[in-house]
């Protein structure tokens, strides 16, 4: 077990490094000299050179990459050119918006989707199942930013229950911050819940066909007890895989949704950074988001092995 | 008639919506009720009527004409994004499956790596830095289709590769390329077609998202995502402007998803079994 964990951790570190290298490479290859873009077309060559030096662009890429990586490891994310502030601080401020948003969306989607999926599986081919799956089919097709607009129309414009945009901040209490996040979280969560409900349904249907379930029923367990004690726990493995993957969708989704609701989160930061060609901020943000996806999926993989001893013998897939 | 019934409702409904979508896009090439970018300030923000079926926007442009032209742009980007994904991904997958070993390992690790980047986030960064526009949006979406098709092709090709007729072809001395083309590709076409319809739907969503944040199709070319962005400014004055483009996106994605479901049930040889629900 320990050897297995050590191997997986090494693979994780290598993946993270490869991801960072890929981002660095892509940003190197993409056209446009940030210094020239910041200063405009009429910049004098000497000011350009000075800015190059300030941005560290006069050093070769082969040196900048390891410097960046070692900086990240020490928690030094570099200095933003447009904000004149350490990137770590900028990110820390915005994480307080984006992370609660993503987590709230994940919680909403899970609490909605799993019961619906189990319910649909238990009443397969009956009216409840058909209805739930029709709604899910629609939900999968709805773009989350449009759903955001519809939610604004209903809850902010018509009913005036919740704010249409902006963020109140956490200083005025939990509710003060949370109320700005409810609509965006719903917009993110509902399409994801539709996918998750479908996965849950098919996973439960799969386990309902297993021999051990027939055995449980034959031994006189009630249908409901067999469902919740045997079918559902065994169905959760594919559900958790999808949950891990959905984390990535939610993170990417916050980028667009924060634009719909003008929330000052990581998504807004990345757009502002791109507009100002503040490449170090872009680079840090992408590596951070990709890194968290990698780590979450790693955690899901490890969790499987802890939950399901059958996976331990076969080792990593 | 028997074959039509066997196609199943998902295939019929999905096929009909998809056909309508493509029809609308094709017709928009030669005819729209009004020129989609014709500004008519005198009739701005008109309500739906006989003259303007879905009303007009703040610049007096006809919403229905814009939706038709938007379908064309959306579909063009999505089709090409899927073509890029299949064009690169399928050969890579076949190659990985045929060679196996270290090449296979390397290609699949690379696919895993690309998967670890949130696709939409990366598409945003790429289009924003490389320059907004339909062409870069298409490339950025297409890149993320490559590992999807590479993985699927590799997995299914390996399963087919273990079957008797492929081994027989090998014994007769046919090369990897010939075997891949003559024996493997025809046998894995069905799952590839199903996946293509799913990726197609996802590409429409992605294009709409990129255009919504101003990175996809550029004005004056109409696009569904951009129409939604424009509508947000007028959400109090003319909320219907936010309804129609979203409905168009939803219907398009729904139609393609249903078509994919239908195709899978139809092409899947295990059809006799009750159809299982798809993974996303």
Image: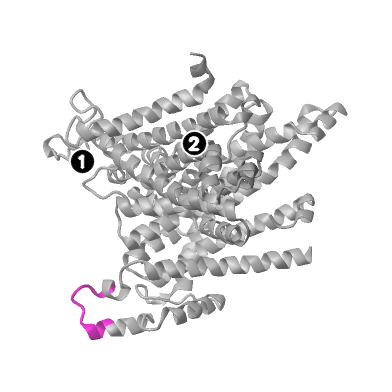
Query: Which residue does the image show at 32% across and 38% down from the upper left?
Result: B242
Vertical side of A166 occupied by A76: above or below:
below
Tell me the CA gap for discs 1 and 2. Answer: 30 Å
Q: Which mark is residue B58?
A: 1
| Residue A16 coordinates in the image, percent (x, y) | 57, 67
| Residue A225 coordinates in the image, percent (x, y) | 79, 32
Q: How many marks?
A: 2
Q: How is the image coloured?
A: one colour
| Residue B267 coordinates in the image, percent (x, y) | 55, 30
Viewed as shown, does residue A41 lie left or right of A159?
left
Query: Residue A111 is drawn in which quadrant?
Result: top right
Residue toward you, A8 or A220:
A8
Which region shows up in magenta? A38-48
Q: Which mark is residue B253?
A: none
Viewed as shown, does residue A11 lie left or right of B244?
right
Which residue is label 2 attached to?
A139
Residue toward you, B201 or A40:
B201
Q: Is residue A47 magenta?
A: yes
Which chain is disc 2 placed on? A
Per the image, label 2 sits on a secondary structure element best described as helix
Per the image, label 1 sits on a secondary structure element best described as loop
Mark 2: give few (<14), some (14-19) or many (20+) Cα within 10 Å. many
């Amino acid at each position: 077990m320990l050897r297995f964990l050590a191997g997986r951790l090494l693979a994780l570190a290598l993946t993270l490094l490869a991801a960072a290298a890929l981002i660095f490479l892509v940003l190197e290859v993409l056209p446009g000299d940030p210094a020239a873009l910041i200063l405009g077309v009429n910049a004098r060559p000497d000011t350009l050179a000075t800015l190059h030096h300030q941005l560290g662009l006069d050093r070769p890429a082969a040196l900048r990459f390891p410097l960046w990586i070692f900086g990240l490891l020490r928690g030094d994310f570099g200095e933003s050119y447009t904000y004149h502030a350490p990137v770590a601080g900028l990110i820390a401020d915005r994480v307080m918006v984006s992370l609660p948003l993503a987590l709230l969306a994940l919680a909403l989607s899970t609490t909605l989707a799993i019961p619906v999926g189990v319910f649909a599986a238990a009443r397969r081919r009956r009216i409840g199942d058909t209805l739930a799956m029709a709604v899910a089919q629609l939900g999968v097709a709805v773009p989350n930013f449009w759903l955001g607009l519809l939610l604004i129309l209903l809850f902010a414009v018509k009913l005036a229950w919740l704010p249409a945009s902006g963020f109140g901040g956490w200083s005025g209490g939990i509710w003060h911050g949370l109320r700005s996040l409810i609509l965006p979280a719903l917009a993110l969560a509902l399409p994801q819940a539709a996918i998750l409900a479908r996965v849950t349904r098919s996973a439960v249907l799969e386990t309902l066909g297993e021999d051990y379930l027939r055995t449980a029923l034959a031994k006189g367990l009630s249908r409901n007890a067999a469902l919740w004690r045997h079918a559902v726990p065994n169905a959760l493995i594919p559900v958790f895989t999808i949950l891990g993957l959905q984390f990535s969708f939610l993170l990417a989704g916050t980028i667009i949704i924060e634009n719909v609701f003008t929330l000052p989160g990581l998504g807004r930061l990345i757009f502002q950074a791109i507009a100002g060609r503040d490449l170090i901020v872009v680079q840090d943000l992408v590596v951070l988001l990709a890194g968290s996806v990698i780590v979450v999926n790693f955690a899901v993989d490890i969790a499987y092995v802890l939950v399901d001893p059958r996976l331990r013998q076969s080792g990593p897939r | 008639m028997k074959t039509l019934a066997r196609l199943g409702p998902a295939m019929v409904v999905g096929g009909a919506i998809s056909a309508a979508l493509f029809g609308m896009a094709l017709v928009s090439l030669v005819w729209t009720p009004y020129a989609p970018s014709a500004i008519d300030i005198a009739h701005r923000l008109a309500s739906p009527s006989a003259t303007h079926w879905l009303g007009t926007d703040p610049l007096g442009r006809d919403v229905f004409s814009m939706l038709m032209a938007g379908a064309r742009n959306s579909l063009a980007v999505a089709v090409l994004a899927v073509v890029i994904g299949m064009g690169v991904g399928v050969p890579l997958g076949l190659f990985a499956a045929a060679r196996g070993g270290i090449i296979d390992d390397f290609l699949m690790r690379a696919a895993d790596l690309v998967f670890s980047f949130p696709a939409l986030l990366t598409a945003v960064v790429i289009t924003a830095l490389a320059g907004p526009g339909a062409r870069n949006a298409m490339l950025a979406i297409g890149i993320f289709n490559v590992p999807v098709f590479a993985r699927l092709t590799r997995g299914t090709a390996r399963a087919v590769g273990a079957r008797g007729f492929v081994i027989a072809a090998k014994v007769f001395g046919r090369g990897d390329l010939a075997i891949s083309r003559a024996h493997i590709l025809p046998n894995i076409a069905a799952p590839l077609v199903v996946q293509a319809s799913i990726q197609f739907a996802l590409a429409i969503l992605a294009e709409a998202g990129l255009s919504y944040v101003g990175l996809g199709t550029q004005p004056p070319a109409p696009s569904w995502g951009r129409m939604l962005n424009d509508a947000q400014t007028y959400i109090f004055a003319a909320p219907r402007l936010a309804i129609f483009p979203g409905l168009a996106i939803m219907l398009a994605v729904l139609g393609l998803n249903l078509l994919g479901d239908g195709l899978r049930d139809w092409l899947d040889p295990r059809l006799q079994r009750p159809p299982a629900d798809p993974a996303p």
